[in-house]
């Protein structure tokens, strides 16, 4: 049995429509950016810089030249990453304007260790070349995002938080903008007393920078036929931030326990532990969503990891101050969309799948692609072209191909898939790929949909520690720590089938780090207000759509 | 120390809250006076003596009939000017909060509200105010006199010490603006039972009840205890009980004297809505339920058995 | 009718108390106090009902409080006044009510509205204090307002039920959160909020000296932070058929029945 057999009643075409608001009521903007993450904000900042030097174009773009829509409560609310950031694209973006020292980093990586864990031991192993972090900086992405948002506003962009992009407006084969989500609907979709309908926002260029599992990105790829032959695959990362008694002096990655190395389980992943200044530490567990065991829970594996001597020692005397979860696109090069633009439309960052899995990096690709999208959009506008003429934005694809994003991803293109063969064999292949700089093996290894993996069951859950409320926590406490206080009587935003067999229901129940699903015996119950919009359900047989604006987690430290 | 306690009444009875504050003030060894403000309220003054007032001021005037704050501010301000007072204490209510706040502005006097306790430390009066959903207690003081304090409902029990108070009439002279608001119709009775946010007792049900039909058990116990019914998010989500009764992070925050949790596991989302309760009794069949970590009395057992029996016993006692 | 709504900017997310000042940390993200959204909504409805007039929003707070005012403007308020001054930080009720009253005096609105309480301070006291300074009639915990013949008829919710109270204008009214469901600002409203008139006043502009604002003008102080008292000895029993009686005994001991 596999989750893909129970495909949800989701049709991308339901989320594509021509504008419906009367023409004089539409919100008309120059460049519309969806998502206030590193990609979208970099795009806004870069356009602002370019428009500063071209006031006549700014003039032409009307009253609101640049808008960034953000579904979270505030910029940063839905941002979560490790994160060790490669600063190269930030340097380029802020060249001559801001220095790395001006940015809210927790300092450069000075030492790093990689361990192979067994239940009782931690074996230090050499740091694989792809994972070396010389010159990189530790950050809270939520915090970096807030800082970027300030820069974007200073550069003239208008930020509109609590505003999800619900539908892609397409008219005559070209993207015209988006329709924002309704607010004030009740549990059954009915209009409440304070109902406020969404609005059509139309633009010359629409940039989708929605991040992982981007709602309209998925819709757009389908509508314009841009999907790769290789389906995207994801991992789920769950992380915590701790206030600690003693500083951690290095970044740590672990492999092995509590994941199992046997190929049949397909448990690819590991953990990270990073210092955030002298008094905080962040740690997380990342596991590929191609795993098969219905009892696997990344949330609980992270709890289990904390009971390891190595980790317990770091957290000793500390206190958890934040929690969050998010998926990571892991398909890499082979899963990149065939084309990153369509008439009037550009796609960047995680939404396009620009993540280097062996290096555990994606933020600098998001920033770079956002900047490149801005440059392509600006070039088209400067030429006085209608950006929705087919090919008018093709320069963006060309720029991406010329960039380090392309080169990096191409080199490691087969590495993730190798680990489908188990930890040891995968590791050996990965070593060979690194040594040959991606020349071995030639060609591309295919990806398989996460939801196509046959399910199996072991008694994995037995080893999850009982939550003690100090070191280990239950899922609801974690949801609370994410700052989530979503209105309970909203319509359900998660599209799944309810009448699924027990295995699938239990898979979802365990998989979800936020206790959204509950297997009932004859199907599954859903508590959508717990959702932290990590996106795991989309990988495993359902579909996440954006709930009412401002819902979900309110991350500040993740 | 001269302390003045505002004694609110409803109908022909002094409210317990004010009497509790009176007892507390008397226990600090202060020279405590009470004040009763209304129309035809002279008869209420005697009662105050029993709870520790050495003196009761009475402002009895037809213009004071309606329970509106501003005329009371006028009376109190005048009294403080004439007789002096170091502290003026109120037990919280809609009327008391408005009166205390108006008086603070009138006298430029410090007001600390939502206090649950007051003590004298090295001669200095210190109030205790819970903050951040009762997760921290803040000690607060006053930098000038008179000091005004507003106490959370149910902070102190009235203690009858049996004394007698002398009674003294005070003059009533009202400002023009104080009579600008006029009572047209007083106190329609609300539906049955107290509202969940104001009830002294809340009996709440969770998923452990097993089904919506078993909420009758919770309702029965709430009725017997004279309390309101609460529910967890899970059962509200499941449609067992209305959203207006939801206690917790995304529902109501309550702090009754007694909270009885029936079949509630005690997730943090629920806890933050009720952890300020005076006494928490939890009944749950799962011995590892987190609710037992913050209950005063935890009973591991079946709500379906225990709650009806408990209701019966409460009713028996009431019958006695 | 000219309506002034007093609103507060309150911290968002996990609140913490700054151990040095012992006051709520207001440095992080903030938002419009949700209870004040009810007051803004009621003002907009009253204006809508009469079809004329002005709704202005007034706040006392840090420069960031502009965000809360912006939200009220996005909902539909016409104009905002922010009283902000470093000297005003740490104002208690006496000092806050004085500064607000001073700002309100200049506006001379027919009706001043407040939300029922701050969700950060849990006080429900500012409306009455400001009303006293403005020497105007006031009603709090108002769950319904009707405006006719230059008078307001309101429904006040108390511990004992509903009162019907009539007041002349000008007046001060603190609404309860039961009065309405605040609207969501429309996207157009949000985008237009920035360009609505927004004035900023300092203590000096209001003729307020350092002695009457901020800590200097306050009459209360925060002394110490303590952990909440432990719940005492927690008892846990297993039901052997006598649990109901055990609960009764416990409640009796605690004098709860």
Image (cartoon, coloured by chain):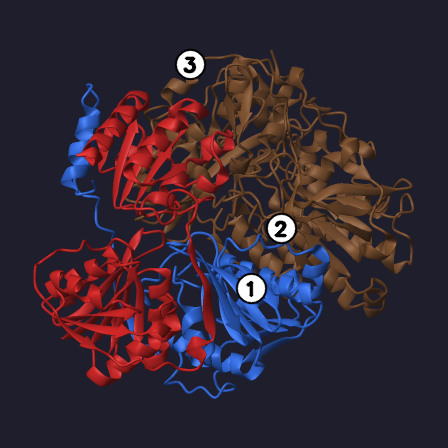
Chain colours: A brown, B red, C blue
Whole-percent x, y for residue A220 in the image: 78, 37
Q: Earlier in the sequence, mark 2 or mark 3?
A: 2
Q: Are marks 3 and 1 on the same chain?
A: no
| Element assignment for label 3 | loop
| Residue on which disc 3 sits | A459
Disc 2 to disc 3, C-alpha distance: 41 Å
| Element assignment for label 1 | helix
Q: How many marks?
A: 3
Vertical arrangement, residue A422 with respect to residue A49, above or below: above
Q: Are marks 2 and 1 on the same chain?
A: no
Q: Chain of mark 1?
A: C
Whole-percent x, y for residue C54 in the image: 66, 72
| Residue on which disc 1 sits | C68
Q: CB under 8 Å between callouts 3 and 1?
A: no
Q: Chain of mark 3?
A: A
| Element assignment for label 2 | loop
Q: Is residue B141 visible?
A: yes
| Residue on which disc 2 sits | A162
Say few, some or many: other residues with alpha carbon within 10 Å of mark 3 (under 14 / 14 to 19 / 20 or more). Answer: few
Vertical arrangement, residue A480 with respect to residue C40, above or below: above
Left/right placement of residue B245 relative to residue A489 reads left
B61 or C209: nearer the viewer: B61
Say few, some or many: other residues with alpha carbon within 10 Å of mark 2 (under 14 / 14 to 19 / 20 or more). Answer: many
Say few, some or many: other residues with alpha carbon within 10 Å of mark 1 (under 14 / 14 to 19 / 20 or more). Answer: many
Quadrant location of the N terminus of chain A in the rendered image: top right
Q: Is residue A415 visible?
A: no
Vertical arrangement, residue A95 with respect to residue A70, above or below: below
Q: Residue at x 66, y 70 (%)?
A: C78
Q: Chain of mark 2?
A: A
């Amino acid at each position: 049995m596999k989750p893909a057999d129970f495909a949800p009643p989701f049709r991308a075409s339901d989320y594509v429509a021509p504008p419906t608001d009367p023409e004089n009521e539409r919100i008309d903007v120059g460049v519309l950016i969806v998502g206030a993450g590193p990609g979208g904000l970099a795009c806004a900042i870069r356009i602002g810089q370019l428009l500063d030097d071209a006031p006549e174009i700014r003039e032409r773009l009307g009253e609101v030249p640049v808008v960034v829509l953000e579904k979270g409560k505030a910029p940063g609310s839905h941002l979560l990453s490790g994160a060790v950031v490669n600063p190269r694209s930030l340097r380029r973006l802020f060249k001559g304007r801001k220095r790395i020292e001006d940015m809210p980093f927790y300092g450069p990586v000075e030492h790093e260790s990689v361990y192979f864990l067994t239940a009782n031991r931690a074996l230090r192993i050499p740091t694989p070349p792809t994972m070396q972090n010389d010159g990189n900086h530790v950050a809270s992405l939520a915090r970096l995002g807030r800082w970027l948002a300030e820069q974007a506003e200073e550069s003239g962009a208008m930020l509109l938080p609590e505003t999800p992009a619900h539908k892609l407006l397409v008219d005559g084969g070209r993207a015209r903008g988006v329709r924002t989500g309704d607010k004030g609907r009740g549990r059954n979709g009915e209009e409440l007393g304070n109902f406020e309908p969404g609005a059509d926002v139309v633009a010359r260029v629409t940039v989708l920078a929605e991040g992982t599992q981007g709602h309209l990105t998925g819709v757009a790829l389908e509508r314009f036929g841009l999907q790769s032959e290789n389906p995207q695959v994801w991992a789920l990362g769950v992380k915590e931030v701790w206030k600690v008694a003693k500083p951690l002096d290095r970044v740590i990655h672990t492999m092995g326990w509590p994941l199992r190395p046997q190929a049949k389980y397909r448990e690819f992943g590991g953990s990270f532990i990073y210092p955030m200044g002298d008094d905080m530490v962040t740690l997380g567990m990342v596991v590929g969503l191609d795993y098969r065991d219905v009892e696997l829970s990344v949330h609980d594996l992270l709890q289990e990891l904390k009971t390891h001597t190595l980790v317990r020692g770091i957290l000793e005397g500390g206190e958890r101050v934040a929690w969050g979860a998010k998926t990571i696109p892991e398909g890499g090069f082979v899963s990149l969309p065939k084309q990153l633009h369509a008439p009037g439309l550009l796609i960047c960052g995680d939404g396009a799948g620009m993540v280097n899995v062996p290096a555990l990096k994606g933020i600098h690709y998001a920033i770079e692609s956002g900047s490149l999208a801005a440059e392509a959009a600006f070039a088209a506008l400067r030429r006085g072209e209608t950006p929705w003429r087919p090919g008018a934005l093709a320069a963006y694809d060309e720029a991406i191909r010329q960039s380090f994003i392309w080169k990096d991803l191409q080199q490691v293109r087969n590495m993730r898939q190798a680990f489908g063969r188990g930890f040891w064999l995968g590791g050996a292949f990965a070593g060979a790929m690194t040594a040959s700089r991606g020349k071995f093996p030639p060609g591309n290894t295919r990806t398989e949909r996460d939801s196509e993996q046959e399910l199996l069951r072991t008694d994995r859950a037995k080893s999850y520690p009982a939550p003690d409320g100090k070191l280990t926590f239950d899922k609801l406490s974690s949801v609370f720590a994410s700052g989530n206080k979503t209105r309970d009587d909203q319509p359900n935003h998660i599209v799944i089938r309810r009448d699924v067999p027990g295995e699938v229901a239990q898979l979802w129940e365990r998989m979800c780090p936020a206790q959204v699903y509950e297997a009932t015996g004859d199907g599954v119950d859903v508590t959508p207000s717990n959702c932290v919009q990590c996106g795991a359900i989309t990988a495993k047989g359902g579909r996440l759509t954006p709930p009412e604006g401002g819902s979900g987690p309110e991350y500040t430290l993740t | 120390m001269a302390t003045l306690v505002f004694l609110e009444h409803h109908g022909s009875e002094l409210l317990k809250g004010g009497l509790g504050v009176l007892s507390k003030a008397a226990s600090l060894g202060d020279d405590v006076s009470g004040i009763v403000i209304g129309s035809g309220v002279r008869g209420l003054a005697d009662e105050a003596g029993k709870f520790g007032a050495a003196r009761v001021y009475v402002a009895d005037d037809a213009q004071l009939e309606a329970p509106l704050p501003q005329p009371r501010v006028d009376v109190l301000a005048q009294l403080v000017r004439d007789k002096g007072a170091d502290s003026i204490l109120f037990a919280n209510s809609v009327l008391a909060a408005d009166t205390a706040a108006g008086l603070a502005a009138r006298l430029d006097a410090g007001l600390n509200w939502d206090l649950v306790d007051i003590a004298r430390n090295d001669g200095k009066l210190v109030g205790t105010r819970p903050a951040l959903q009762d997760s921290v207690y803040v000690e607060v003081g006053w930098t000038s006199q008179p000091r005004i304090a507003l106490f959370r409902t149910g902070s102190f029990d009235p203690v009858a010490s049996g004394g007698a108070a002398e009674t003294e009439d005070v003059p009533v002279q009202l400002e023009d603006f104080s009579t600008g608001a006029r009572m047209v119709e007083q106190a329609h009775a609300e539906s049955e039972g107290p509202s969940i946010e104001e009830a002294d007792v809340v009996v709440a049900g969770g998923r452990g009840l097993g089904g919506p039909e078993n909420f009758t058990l919770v309702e029965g116990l709430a009725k017997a205890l004279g309390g309101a019914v609460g529910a967890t998010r899970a059962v509200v989500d499941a449609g067992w009980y209305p959203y207006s009764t939801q206690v917790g992070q995304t529902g109501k925050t309550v702090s009754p004297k007694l909270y009885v949790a029936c079949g509630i596991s005690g997730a943090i989302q629920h806890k933050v809505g009720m952890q300020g309760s005076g006494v928490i009794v939890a009944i749950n069949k799962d011995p590892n339920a987190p609710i037992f970590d913050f209950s005063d009395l935890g009973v591991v057992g079946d709500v379906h058995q225990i709650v009806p029996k408990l209701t019966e016993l409460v009713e028996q006692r009431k019958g006695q | 009718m000219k309506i002034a709504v007093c609103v507060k900017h309150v911290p968002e997310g996990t609140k913490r108390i700054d151990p040095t000042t012992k006051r709520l940390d207001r440095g992080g993200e903030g938002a419009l106090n949700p209870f004040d959204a009810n007051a803004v909504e009621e003002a907009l409805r009253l204006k809508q009902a009469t079809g004329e007039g002005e709704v202005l929003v007034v706040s006392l707070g840090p420069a960031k409080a502009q965000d809360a005012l912006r939200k009220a403007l996005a909902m539909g308020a016409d104009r905002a006044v922010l009283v902000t001054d470093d000297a005003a930080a740490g104002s208690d009720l006496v000092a806050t009510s004085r500064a607000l009253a001073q700002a309100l005096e200049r506006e001379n609105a027919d009706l001043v509205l407040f939300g029922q309480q701050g969700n950060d301070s849990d006080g429900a006291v500012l409306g009455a204090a400001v009303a006293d300074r403005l020497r105007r009639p006031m009603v709090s915990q108002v769950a319904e307002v009707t405006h006719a013949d230059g008078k307001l008829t309101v429904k006040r919710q108390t511990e004992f039920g509903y009162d019907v109270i009539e007041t002349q204008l000008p007046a001060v009214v603190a609404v309860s959160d039961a009065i309405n469901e605040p609207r969501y600002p429309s996207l157009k409203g949000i985008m237009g909020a920035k360009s609505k008139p927004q004035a900023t006043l300092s203590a000096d502009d209001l003729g307020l000296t350092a002695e009457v604002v901020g800590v200097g003008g306050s009459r209360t102080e925060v002394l110490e932070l303590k952990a909440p008292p432990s719940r005492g000895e927690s008892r846990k029993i297993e039901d052997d058929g006598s649990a109901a009686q055990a609960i009764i005994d416990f409640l009796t001991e605690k004098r709860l029945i």
